[in-house]
Amino acid sequence: MFTSPYPPVDIPDVSIYDYLFGDLLTSDTGPSDLDRVAVVDGATGAAMTYGTLVDQINRVAGAFAAHGAGPGTVVALLCPNIPAFTSVFHGLLRAGITVTTINSLYTAGEIQRQLADAGATWLVTVSPLLAGAREAAQTVGFDDTHLIVLDGAVGHPSLADLLLAEPLVDAPSIDPATHVAVLPYSSGTTGRPKGVMLSHRNLVANVQQARGLINVVPDDRVLALLPFFHIYGMTVLLNLAFKQRASLVTMAKFDLTEFLRIIQDERCSYVFIAPPVAVALAKHPLVADYDLSSVHTILSGAAPLDGALAAAVAERLGCRMLQGYGMTEASPVSHLIPRDAPEISRDSVGVTIPNMECKLVSLDTGAEIPLPKTGVSDPGELLVRGPNVMLGYLNNDEATRETIDSDGFLHTGDVATVSAAGVVKIVDRSKELIKYKGYQIAPAELEALLLTHPHVNDAAVIGVNDDDGQEIPKAYIVAVTDAGITAEVVIAWVAERVAPHKKVRVVEFIDAIPKSASGKILRKDLRARDTLSS
């Protein structure tokens, strides 16, 4: 077993609201944290101070409390990165409500499934996403008053309506260690998306564990490109950046020109990205047209980052390039390259964060692999344990037991090595999960969908690399005899039924899907086949 080279940190036994905003300072003689800029709309430059943010948070909390929502209520939030998201998200948590965040790219069917599985009774969205949201809400039986459209829509409450409420003064009493604060959905290492139950303590712990290593400071202007609905953006942007009293600059969707303009015009200093953005920063000629000198640090997460690519970005922009690792089930951060550790290789994920224990276990025997006295260990599955590890999967005890063992270790499904100095490197992908531009795609979900096609007898999905080195879903199809189905038909059919990032992008027809005696798909055989044919 190995731990962090950094000392343990104290984890307050408080709600996420009290942790983030409970110590806001006021002063009669000079500026206070309440006067600092909390959020900037990257599209317009409109700014909101911490004082305004906290007032909006408490008014949103008061509005929902006035309608009887509180502990035991689940509210779904389907919204891109805009300033309103920050007020609503923390307002719901302030009221003791559990928030399930929904991918903004989801189809109506995917929204409906998450609403139903999470037991949500309200849905908050914006007008550009209203069509899918309304269809999903009507399917699960919401009336119009329980579908809130933040920027306004006839017949639905808006953010302006919520902000007319009296601010919540006395928050409901909750146990931070057991009360479910957020319910993001993750596939773990396999299977359909499952609700990940994260407590207030989980969220507080992960910010407290990571803040000293990431080292965002109040003068930083942090670009909020990573989606708030994803646990990565939720923790390092909605929570950690606010705890540090930095300014968040929101960006609703990625566009390279707009991304570069916002960094330049808003003088963003700390930028959190996924690897595909690093590719653009390293290679795209457009980068040279913008002044990015304000950027001192970029941290990449959500998928593996190549060390050479990290070096290319750092050299081109003259900044630090860091990498982190984690899982939704760990709130998510478990490993980081600290901001003040230039000696750590950028193709690693750094060191274990404080208050966590890790171990590697052999894939063959399950035996623990010892920390080496010198050099690097043999590879093994990475297991992690700490106060940031989830309570479990919602209504799925079996999946919880498969993921968290009796000793409390979370089985990541990723294969790693560890050096004598405690530096961890991920050396193999999770057993099944595909990561496309930082988004998780469960092969089993696409396989289940493909099997509903009338001309598909059997199907399997694996991740393969495209010409740019990006992992994409590839489907192997056993077609109905003489059906005449084509790859183009399959690709178009799937695209109509899933979010854009989940689309099948390559199709190959085969005679039979390789399976084990127990019926499990032998993905390693498909990967070997793909390697031979490429």
Image (cartoon, rainbow, N blue to C red):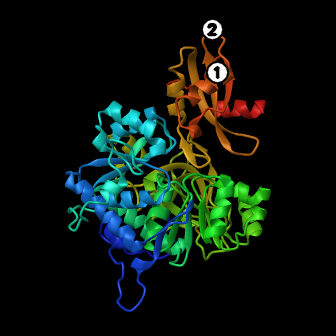
Cα gap from disc 1 to disc 2, whole angstroms: 16 Å
Q: Residue at x 46, y 60 (%)?
A: 83
- Residue 65: horizontal and vertical position, in percent? 22, 56
Classify mark 2: helix, strand or loop. loop
Examine the image and state in which quarter residue 275 appears.
Answer: bottom right
The circle on residue 489 is 1
**Position of the C terminus by quadrant:** top right
Image height check: is 440 above or below 295?
above
Q: Residue beneath label 2, please?
A: 481
Q: Secondary structure at mark 1?
A: helix
Q: Nearer the viewer, mark 1 or mark 2?
A: 1
Type of amino acid at the residue the image marks with label 1 = Val
The residue drawn where x is 68% and y is 22% is 487
Left or right: residue 514 versus residue 332 is right
Disc with the residue nearer the chain's start (1 vs 2)? 2
Percent coordinates x, y for residue 329 in the rendering: 44, 52
